[in-house]
Amino acid sequence: MTATGNAGRRADAALPDWLVAHPLTAGWLWLAVFGALGLVAGVLDWSVAASLLVVALLVLPPVTAMIVVLRETPRRTLETHGSVLGHFLTRYLVIIAGFLAWTASIVLGATISTSLTLLAEGREREVLGIGFSLVLGIVLPTIAVLWVVFLLRCAWFLARVRGWRQSPGSTVVPARMLLRRPRLRTVTIGLAHPGLLTATALVSGVALLAVVISDLTLLLE
C-alpha cells in the first residue's frame, strides 16, 4: 500500500462520526451560517471581495459534492431513468430562464443607449465610463441568473441519481466513487442533496445579485 493510500485512509477515518451520520444536517447548518454571514455583509456594507468570499464559502460543500457525484456518474445511467415529460419539462424551463435573461439584456441595452444619448453633452469620456459600468450591470446579473439555473438543473439530476434521503440505501452512483474512502463517500453523497443544492442556488443567486447591484450603485454615484 502506498503512502498516499495510507494518508487517504487516515484522513477518511479522521472524519467526525457526527458528520458521517448527519451530512445533510451539517450542510443545512453550513448554509444557515454563511447565509446569515452574507446578510451581515450586506447590512454592514462589506467590500465586494469579502462578500464574494462569503458566497464562495457558502456554495463550497454542496457544489463540490455535486461535482464529485455527477462527474463519476455515467451519462447512460441518467438516460435509463426518468420520463420523457421530465426530460422536456426541464429543458423548457431552462430555455424560459435563458429567454428571460436575454430579454432583460435587450431592454436594459436599449435603456443604456437612450440614457447615454441624453447624457452625451460634451462629456464623452465620462459617459463612456458610465456605459461600461452599465454593461457590467447587465452581464453580471445575467451570469448570476444562469448560475442559479445551472445549479437547479444539476439538482434535478441529483434527484434522479441519489434520491431525496439524507443517506440513501441505494443509488445509481458508481461503486468506484471514493471506493477506498467509505466515510468520505457517505458525506459526499449526503451533501450532494437536491434540496440542499436548490436552496444553495437560490441563496447564492440572491447574494450575488445583491453584491452586483450594490457595486453598480456605487459606480454610478
Image: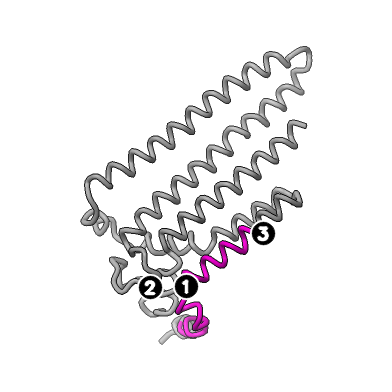
Task: Residue at 58%, 39% (x, y): give it.
Answer: 140
Task: Residue at 61%, 55% (x, y): give it.
Answer: 55
> Distance between the Cα atoms at labels 3 and 2?
28 Å
Colouring scheme applied when the structure was drawn: one colour
- Amino acid at pointer 2: Ser
Q: Earlier in the sequence, mark 3 or mark 2?
A: 3
Give the image quarter of residue 168.
Answer: bottom left
Looking at the rendered structure, the number of numbered marks drawn on it comes to 3
- Amino acid at pointer 1: Pro
Residue 10 magenta: yes
Q: Secondary structure at mark 2?
A: loop
Residue placed under numbered mark 1 in the picture: 23
Q: Earlier in the sequence, mark 1 or mark 3?
A: 1
Q: Which mark is residue 89?
A: none
Q: Position of residue 198 (x, y in %)?
A: 46, 54
- Amino acid at pointer 3: Leu
Task: Residue at 54%, 61% (x, y): give it.
Answer: 60
